[in-house]
Image: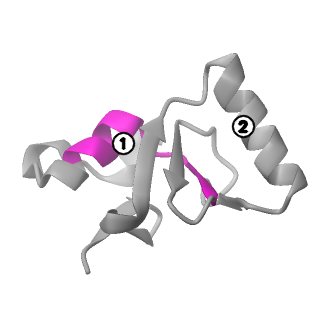
């Protein structure tokens, strides 16, 4: 099982990720709000702005302070796209 760094030392299993989306659209905001009400949100932003929403196959919603493009690059194994969290956050 391979883990992907989603910021500030937090990892998620790459095989469990269904979607990696930007938090800006209204449907995603609604999805996060509904998941928060049901207790399915995992917030790993460390108090910073949410820049990516990760949806897992277990119906959990993970909020990350790392940009979705950076996480996608890490999923693809692109070393050039895996900059430090501090520069993205």
Part of the protein shown in magenta:
60-73
Residue shown at 68% from the left, 23% from the top: 27
Q: Residue furthest top?
A: 25
> Pointer 1: residues within 10 angstroms few (<14), some, or many (20+)?
few
Looking at the image, is 65 positioned above or below residue 14?
A: above
**Residue 24 visible (yes or no):** yes
> Residue 53, position in %: x, y?
55, 42
Name the image colouring: one colour
Circle on res. 23: none
**Residue 82 visible (yes or no):** no
Residue under numbered circle 2: 31
Residue shown at 42% from the left, 68% from the top: 12
> Pointer 2: residues within 10 angstroms few (<14), some, or many (20+)?
some
Q: Residue furthest right?
A: 37
Number of marks drawn: 2
Residue shown at 86% from the left, 58% from the top: 38
In reply to whether residue 63 is colored magenta, the answer given is: yes
In reply to whether residue 44 is colored magenta, the answer given is: no
Q: Secondary structure at mark 2?
A: helix
Q: Secondary structure at mark 1?
A: helix
Looking at the image, is 50 positioned above or below residue 55?
A: above
Residue under numbered circle 1: 87
Task: Give the mark toward the camera: 1 or 2.
Answer: 2
> Residue 51, position in %: x, y?
53, 36
Q: Quick check: marks 1 and 2 in contact, CB under 8 Å? A: no
Residue shown at 62% from the left, 59% from the top: 59
> Residue 32, position in %: x, y?
73, 41
């Amino acid at each position: 099982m391979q883990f992907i760094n989603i910021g500030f030392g937090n990892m998620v299993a790459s095989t469990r990720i269904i979607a990696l989306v930007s938090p800006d659209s209204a449907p995603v905001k609604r999805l996060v709000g509904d998941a928060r009400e049901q207790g399915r949100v995992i917030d790993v932003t460390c108090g910073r702005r949410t820049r990516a929403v990760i949806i897992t196959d277990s119906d959990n919603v993970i909020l990350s302070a790392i940009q979705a493009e950076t996480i996608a690059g890490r999923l693809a194994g692109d070393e050039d796209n895996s900059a430090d969290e501090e520069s993205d956050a």
